[in-house]
Amino acid sequence: MTDSPGKKIVVTGATGNVGTSVVRLLSEDPAVASVVGLARRTPHWSPPRTTWKAVDLEKDTGLVELFRGADAVVHLAWKFQPARDPAVTWRTNVLGSVRVFEAVARAGVPALIHASSVGAYSPGPDDRAVDESWPTHGWPGAAYTREKAYLERVLDTFEREHPGTRVVRMRPAFLFKRESASEQRRIFGGRLLPGPLLRPEALPVVPDIPGLRFQALHSDDAADAYRLAVLREVRGAFNIAADPPLDAGVLGELFHARPVRVPSPVARSGLAAAWALHLLPASPQLFDAVLRLPLMDCARARTELGWQPRRTAVEALEELLEGMRRGSGADTAPLRGRTVG
């Protein structure tokens, strides 16, 4: 850490979709003196006032010394794959997060900003959005939602045992940006998903699956919420998402395509078959979880953080799709661009 005036921030998972945006915004903020980015593989990218450290959260990484003297730790590190081996993701996502929380306490860091998710929420009502008081028990069938919900319980205990640490739980919707396109195609669609198929003229219809409605957000807008949570004396959970919610009607307008009703059991059977044939990296259990996600009310982020998204959910999705068509990426290992199709 430097001795310059201003905040000294450590960011885990600093080279991924959200991490690169968080590091960039923090490094550009005059209230921040230094940023330490932690990742398994350090990048060549060099934003201002930023240093990199290679860290694997599955191992004993000396986190206490890395955190000592920091004003806040922003914990973003997460592993989506291999979805077929949930024990592997559990070691990084849950046990690695517990190591981070324990190191924050031992190093005396005054603030912990944790990346939770809409996926931590229990299934919600169809007729209204939920605020941050909605139960966070996740959906038990999917590893991602189980892990996010489990960490909410870990943080409940952490806050009782360490009341002097300011804990913020960010619960974002789906996060998109152009530079994350290649990574998200690999994680959710598979390497063989042809980018040109995502052009409007190539899709005459979009499936209208009952219950499939979700919120989204540009990764840079999410990063601004993290920046505000670092700099302001706030605590607790914050929902962050942009309008409008994305459903078959919105997607039909985006692709100039006609929504066609597809029963959810039929859609799930197709996904399960592709999963069984190793054609799809995203599990059918994740599809089950998405169908049960509640819509989030983001009023608290607006009033207490002073946060507003600059882009709509449609604009964020359009940017991602354009990036997928072009094989876009960034100069970090997780976001590196790939040949499309």
Image (cartoon, grey):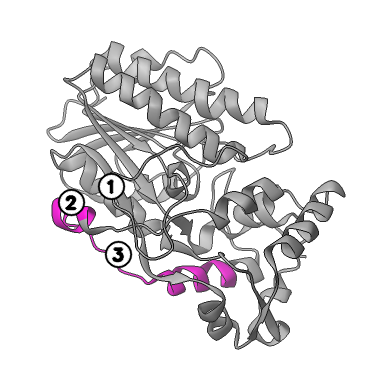
SS for dot 2: helix
Sort mark 1 into few (<14), some (14-19) or many (20+) by Cα contacts within 10 Å. many
Q: Which residue is mark 2?
A: 305
Q: Is residue 20 left or right of residue 240?
A: right
Label number found at residue 309: 3
Q: Is residue 96 above or below residue 333?
A: above
Viewer-proximal residue among 25 and 240: 240
Viewer-proximal residue among 238 and 290: 290
Q: Which residue is mark 1?
A: 238
Residue at point 60%, 88% (across, down): 256
Place residue 4 in its image quadrant: top left
Sort mark 3 into few (<14), some (14-19) or many (20+) by Cα contacts within 10 Å. some
Do labels 3 and 2 touch, CB within 8 Å? no
Place residue 260 in its image quadrant: bottom right
Q: Amino acid at mark 3?
A: Pro
Do labels 2 and 1 touch, CB within 8 Å? yes
SS for dot 3: loop
Magenta span: 300-322
Q: Amino acid at mark 1?
A: Phe
Q: Amino acid at mark 2?
A: Leu
Place residue 322 in its image quadrant: bottom right
Residue at point 63%, 69% (across, down): 209
**Residue mark closest to the camera, 2 vs 1:** 1
Q: Is residue 58 above or below residue 13?
A: above
Q: Main secondary structure of the magenta part?
A: helix
| Whether residue 25 can be seen here | no
Give the quarter of the figure containing the C terminus. Answer: bottom right
Q: Earlier in the sequence, mark 3 or mark 1?
A: 1
